[in-house]
Image (cartoon, helix red, strand yellow):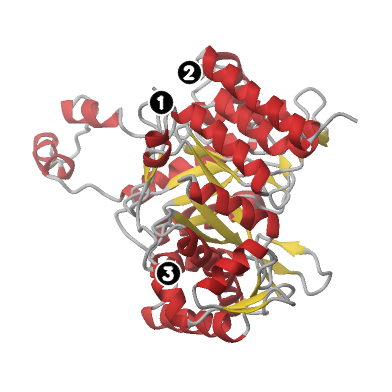
Amino acid sequence: MPTIQPMRPRFRLEVLAAEQVAAIRSATLQVLETVGVHLPSPRALDIMAQHGARVDWQRQVVRLPPDLVVQAMGKAPRSYVLGGRAEGTALTLDGTCTYFATDGCGTETLDPQTGRPRRSCKEDVARMARVADALSSVAFYWPVVSAQDYGPLAPLHELDASFLNTVKHVQTETVMGAALARYAVEMARVIAGDEATLRARPPMSLLVCTIAPLAQDRAGIEGAMVMAEAGIPVGFMSMPNIGATAPATVAGALIVGNAEVVSAMVLIQLLVPGAPVYHSILASVMDPRSGEYIVSIPEKYLANAAAVQLAHDWGVPALGGAFGMDDVAPATWRLGQDSVYTALLVPLAGAEMVTGGGLLRASTLLVPEQLLFDDEIYHVHRRLLEGIDTSPESLAQEVISTVGPRGNFLAQGHTRRHIRHVWLPPLGHPAPVPAGQPTPEIRLRAQARLEQILAEHQPEPLPPAARAELQSILEAAARELAPAG
């Protein structure tokens, strides 16, 4: 059975005061009512119009009355379960703990043989799924890179590689459009085994990115509607770029992102009242000197943590972002500094889900061993958020009295019981090497651990019948969506 160790914070961080959350909600409702959101889907516009939204059919812009937004969002569930295909993989999104995932949709990877960047492929998705399956820091798997060797069918092949190589929940962010979504639902149904399980403990969920500022993607929205009708949880992520696709302030960017995400969740609730949805805003900043995209910056850290409060203000789970920083090499001072902020602030804010492990260069480049560095940062933070135990056993008054002044605690039974539970970061504090031998450099240690996982870890295999069904679905999708010639 796989091991998943979620973060269970004993204390919380609120980036925004209650009155600030209220101000952002009020501004969001005003934007949705007076400015509106571009929604380039005839089906989605029709659903909105049927429920009282003001639709400009020519411009494909929808404006939402505040009462409609509040009533629709009131139907969204605060908590639900994400399932896997093995015991011990169910994730309950109820705010009591935070589950981390890999990052996703990278376009390049460092080749394991050459160490040079190349386009990613399906085998990369499969390899990293096996690594994610072995790591207790990873509770659910995003296909970390894209299966570019399968063209328009890449999203389905990413799901196939994921389902075959991890028993954990899989969250796709590349299934776009109604046709692909229908095939993805069929794949999820194979993994779930039956319709009731698919809806109660779905083994797959969907993330759809909005288009900043104030727009939806037609294929994304239409795929989301298919998924929601099938009982698959659907989340929406806004990625406002402060100063470019969003105002040059964190608060302004949060309002733009909130409006995008909420408008999409309202659509899903109008279509399928009570459908499981989740909220996500991952900000970035435009470098005013060059126009470049920056993620390693305080404004991003604050925005990502504040977005969690906005999600909970609407009564839905939050997906936060961590890691995925600007650097292209692991084990650097700057990367370590930047990774710490988001990977700590977002769980402290109470996010149910967090994504970001394994990718660098603003979440575009897979450096496989980086996932081992992120795993270690995760477990340091997990331990920090557990806080300090002050039970009678931990206060240790009896053993302190026994040892007394100028003694030591080495031979005490209390020490033997508790010292074994002290977690030693394997990369930061490696096991001692024989005298006279140098300790390998930290990146080499991470690479060795990665190779060990790939050599030794074997996820529970899918039954042959299920594998055959997945293959049949892929073949049917190829005939319909990517015909030969």
Could you classify mark 1 by the number of other residues whose Cα lies within 10 Å: few (under 14), some (14-19), or many (20 or more)? some
Q: Are marks 2 and 1 in contact (CB under 8 Å)?
A: yes
Q: Which label belongs to residue 479?
A: none
Q: Disc 2 residue type?
A: Glu
Q: Position of residue 132 (x, y in %)?
A: 54, 31
Q: Would you say 289 lies left or right of 100 here?
A: right
Q: Are marks 1 and 3 in contact (CB under 8 Å)?
A: no
**Earlier residue among tags 3 and 2:** 3
Residue at (76, 30) in percent of width and height: 479
Q: Position of residue 173 (x, y in %)?
A: 62, 47
**Earlier residue among tags 2 and 1:** 1
Is residue 354 depicted above or below 252 in this figure?
above
Q: Report, in whole angstroms, how far the alpha carbon at label 3 lies from the one at label 2.
A: 40 Å
Q: Which residue is mark 1?
A: 86
Q: The N terminus lies in which quarter of the figure?
A: top left
Q: Disc 1 residue type?
A: Ala
Q: Which label belongs to residue 72?
A: 3
Q: Position of residue 195 (x, y in %)?
A: 42, 34
Q: Which residue is mark 2?
A: 460
